Amino acid sequence: MIERGVVELRDIGFRYDEHEVLRHVDLTLEEGELVLVSGRTGVGKSTLLGVVTGLVPRFTGGVLTGDVLLDGASIVDQPPRERAHVVGYVSQDPLAGFVTDTVEEELAYGMEQVGTAPETMRRRVEETLDLLGIADLRARDLRTLSGGQQQRVAIGSVLTMHPRVLVLDEPTSALDPTAAEDVLATITRLVHDLGLTVLLAEHRLERVVPFADRVCLVTADGIRVDTPQAVLADSPVAPPLVELGRLAGWSPLPLTVRDARRQARSLPALAPPVPPAPVEVDPVLTARGVTVVHGAHVAVRDLDLTLGAGRVTVLMGRNGSGKSSLIWALQGTGKRRSGSVHVAGDDPADLAPAQRRTHVGLVPQNAADLLYLESVAQECAAADAGAEAPAGTCRGLLDRLAPGIDGTIHPRDLSEGQRLALALSIVLTARPPVVLLDEPTRGLDYAGKAELARIVADLAADGRAVLLATHDVEFAAHVADEVVVMAEGEIVSAGAPQRVLAESPSFAPQVTKVLGAPWLVVEEVATALADTRDEDAR
Ligand SMILES: Nc1ncnc2c1ncn2[C@@H]1O[C@H](COP(=O)(O)OP(=O)(O)OP(=O)(O)O)[C@@H](O)[C@H]1O
Ligand SMILES: Nc1ncnc2c1ncn2[C@@H]1O[C@H](COP(=O)(O)OP(=O)(O)OP(=O)(O)O)[C@@H](O)[C@H]1O
């Protein structure tokens, strides 16, 4: 008998006119394995996932060649709807995928479509509410949920269908670190206990690598599929632990914090980095007593915040803790129940939109909200004109964040990371004194994030105040001058990253977990190692 995978992709090719996205892709997914799809922004990860779900080419256009098999039978001509009970899919944009109005309805919808018995439906809805920690949201309108709450519902609504194959596109991008761990552990349990097959695209390898059986690295030349160890040994994208292992010359490369801690015993004694001394800063934005209320829910409670010139403040906190609500209130569009916000003598809430943009720039969680023109080139030209910046300014920023995007593409057709990069470039072109970024790393690869960190540092060096909300602890460790943690609408901790991040079990970056505070990032270890080697040489 021939061993067959659950899903087989045979010599898959896909192109939009001249733009070739996938070629000669052969991939077999076995029962009960989790395959991680990684690769640069816009390289074709979502497209590869779409070939399995059938959304590509049916809903994207373009030309698909090759064959897709499910249990040995070709399904390449089968519409996504007919595969849905076997192949569950969670997209990068949960809101766009919702078909009902409330959490409970959404969890039941797929089961209703396939005629699941009512008592089974009821039971699975309850199980899923618990599994994903969303029981208290059951009656809520989907559109009023926070980004992370929406993402949990989207995952839940697919799990209730008990699919055999689960296709997930950045499923933890909006989740706080603890929730992300929980969701990945839940999925892994289904993989191990029920033989679920999972294909999962993710940029934050540090989160997913420990759970992956194999990694599929997508490059412009095709795919490479191997064990995480083998792919990461020389892959251009690697999590901090692997970077640390490469730097210290460890073999095998550590994939978990536990492995790295063991190997770290072999490191020479290193002089820890000296945290920067606190400095006096000029306030650029001052918020006092800000309260934001949605219906009966107090999202931000009597909160004071000062953003200083030249400072990057990172806003963290559990899903639903009020970060986005605060950001919109600071920008002036979000309704405040009470309190005041001042930027350069004005309250942004009192200004007309055009004037407000010169005070405060905001890149929202859903970057598409900022894009309204027909092409990338038009968006860039409009941003330059609006900001009276030299022609090419916006495009220059875009090429730093996500290089090589064709200017004629409609913003709607960009990959998730490319779209975010465009929205960031548009807002940053105006160089407002206050820059607010709501989860600015979704869909960005490590190189894109490193560029974003440099751009943010440039803005700060130029005297701007930057506030960015993120769940990406590694990115936070790289950019933060100060970290502010929210819980239940209030600030519960604030201070230097060496203290707030490093001392928290949920927010500590990988390097801190291995070496302890005040270590935060691999670059610090590289510097310290080079120093000891210099001394040895002397
Ligand atoms: N209609 C279209 N015409 C031309 N190119 C397109 C069109 N739609 C998508 N593309 C391009 O196809 C490529 C693949 O996109 P895809 O969404 O698969 O990337 P990705 O690797 O998932 O990116 P990300 O990491 O940002 O999620 C991108 O470069 C995108 O710009
Ligand atoms: N219209 C609304 N009605 C009721 N509750 C709302 C409404 N809008 C938002 N909320 C709630 O307010 C809280 C704060 O939401 P917010 O989006 O500010 O959180 P967040 O910290 O940005 O979360 P995430 O990390 O998931 O993006 C959440 O519990 C959310 O469900």
Image (cartoon, rainbow, N blue to C red):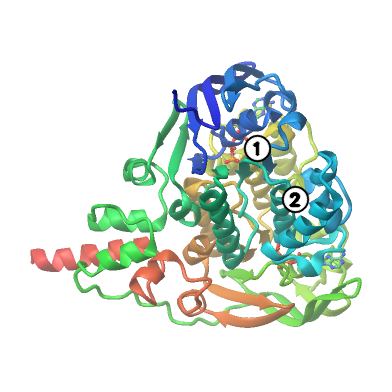
Ranked by sequence position, the earlier of labels 2 and 1 is 2
Callout 2: helix, strand or loop?
helix
Q: Which residue is denoted by mark 2 in the rendering?
A: 157
Q: Residue furthest front?
A: 1
Query: Residue shown at 87%/63% (left/top)?
Result: 139
Residue 428 % position (x, y):
65, 52
Callout 1: helix, strand or loop?
loop
How busy is the neighbourhood of tag 2: few (under 14 within 10 Å), some, or many (20 plus)?
Answer: many
Q: Is residue 296 above or below residue 473?
A: below
Q: Which residue is denoted by mark 1 in the rendering?
A: 391
Q: Quadrant of residue 336?
A: bottom right
Q: Is residue 378 above or below residue 184?
A: above
Give the spatial CA distance, label 2 vs label 1: 46 Å
State how many labels appear: 2
Residue 451 % position (x, y):
50, 50
Q: Quadrant of ligand 1?
A: top right
Q: Is residue 397 left or right of residue 98?
A: left
